[in-house]
Amino acid sequence: MQGHAALSDAWAWAQAIAIDSSLGIVFINAFQALRERDKIRAMNFFTLTALLATVAGLITHFDALGLPVSDKGISGVIPLWIMTALRAVAVIGFLLTSRLKNFSFNEVRNDWHRGRRSLHERLV
């Protein structure tokens, strides 16, 4: 792709879209695996979520740092690199949190408590 700016840009956009579109799905799959008590699958999905979030956050961070800005700090107090890092964390956090809108943590907690009681009853 060296020497082909259009192809290089298309590849970069395709990768960014692939990462961003799969991040939320992988994240919710981790919680669904947790709800189903499939700890190995949940661990795999959470690990993949962390890796995808890291890559997406770094892409967002470095993209924002590359923008032409005349002042490298906000009012001379907060450096630009801190603000872009916080922006990347906020973007990724919003993406992940938005996928949990239909997920009930109370259901997971109740399922876990029911499972413990059932196990205790079987043992007694």
Image (cartoon, helix red, strand yellow):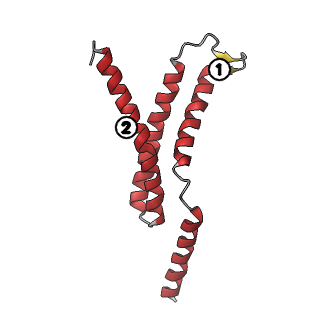
Q: Residue at coordinates 44% horizontally, 38% vertically from top-left?
A: 20
Q: Position of residue 43 (x, y in %)?
A: 43, 55
Q: Secondary structure at mark 2?
A: helix
Q: Residue at coordinates 33% horizontally, 24% vertically from top-left?
A: 10
Quadrant in the picture for residue 110: bottom right
How far apart marks 1 and 2 lie (CA) works out to 30 Å
Quarter of the rendering occupied by the N terminus = top left
Q: Residue at coordinates 50% horizontally, 29% vertically from top-left?
A: 60
Q: Is residue 60 above or below residue 53?
A: above
For the image, the number of numbered tags is 2
Q: Mark 1 or mark 2, which is nearer to you?
A: 2
- Amino acid type of the residue tagged 1 in the rendering: Pro
Q: Residue at coordinates 45% horizontally, 67% vertically from top-left?
A: 37
Q: Position of residue 81 (x, y in %)?
A: 59, 22
Q: Secondary structure at mark 1?
A: strand
Marks 2 and 1: in contact by CB < 8 Å?
A: no
Quadrant in the picture for residue 51: top left
Q: Outermost residue, top direction?
A: 70
| Residue 53 placement, left or right of 3 | right
- Amino acid type of the residue tagged 2 in the rendering: Ala
Bin the neighbour count of mark 2 within 10 Å (Cα to Cα): few under 14, some 14-19, many 20 and up. Answer: few
Give residue 20's mark. none
Q: Position of residue 118 (x, y in %)?
A: 51, 82
Q: Is residue 67 above or below residue 41?
A: above
- 29 and 102: which is toward the camera: 102
Q: Residue beneath label 1, please?
A: 79
Q: Residue beneath label 2, please?
A: 18
Q: Is residue 79 above or below residue 46?
A: above
Q: Outermost residue, bottom direction?
A: 124
Quadrant in the picture for residue 40: bottom left
